[in-house]
Structures are given as C-alpha cells and as structure tokens.
Amino acid sequence: MTLQLIDITVRDKQAHPRLAGRITGHVRAVLIDQMGASEQTHELIIPVWADVQDGTSDADIDMALMVKAADIVSRLKANLNPATPL
C-alpha cells in the first residue's frame, strides 16, 4: 500500500472564540492509495489550529494550518505502514 498526498488546501479558518491569538479551521487533504494495480482517491477534512501573532499574514496562517494537517497525515501514513518487525 502506498499513500501519496496530492493536494492540500485550507477549506475555512476563523479566530478561536475564546483564545486570543489562536486560529482554528479545516484543511482538505487529498490522498491517493495505490495497492498493486488498484488506485483509490481519499479526501480528508482535517480540523486544525495554530497560534499566531497579531499582524500575521493570511498566507502565513494558511501555511501554518497546512503544515499542521500535513503532520497529521504523516502520522496517519506511519500508522498504516508500520515498519516490518525484525
């Protein structure tokens, strides 16, 4: 099984209602799962958050949210493809 991240975008974002400096949102990640000759596409909506400074640009906020989501996808891939036992 091979999982590849082919697309990642910020779907929505907003300021946290109670925590100043925190942005919450959802990131859309598209993965392709290849198993032999079979290929399947998976679309995930991942809830994420990031703490940002006042004046942080929208592009930097989007990048922080996508990095957080990419880390979650990376951990998912690691759990689905455990290392072979010795």
Image: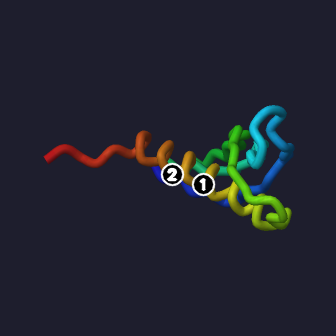
Residue 24, horizontal then vertical, whole percent: 76, 42
Nearer to the camera, 55 or 31: 55
- Is 71 on the left-hand or right-hand side of 54? left
* Amino acid under disc 1: Ala
Mark 2 crowd level (few <14, some 14–19, many ≥20, 10 Å Cα) = some
Mark linked to residue 8 = none
- Outermost residue on the left side: it is 86
Nearer to the camera, 69 or 34: 69
Secondary structure at numbered mark 1 = helix
Nearer to the camera, 83 or 2: 83
Identify the image quadrant of residue 46. Answer: top right
* Amino acid under disc 2: Ser
Mark linked to residue 74 = 2
For the point 80% across and 38% down, the residue is: 16
Q: Give yes or no for contact between labels 1 and 2 (Cβ–Cβ under 8 Å).
A: yes
Residue wearing tag 1: 70
Distance from the alpha carbon under mark 1 to that under mark 2: 6 Å
Residue 20 seen anywhere in this rendered image of the structure: yes
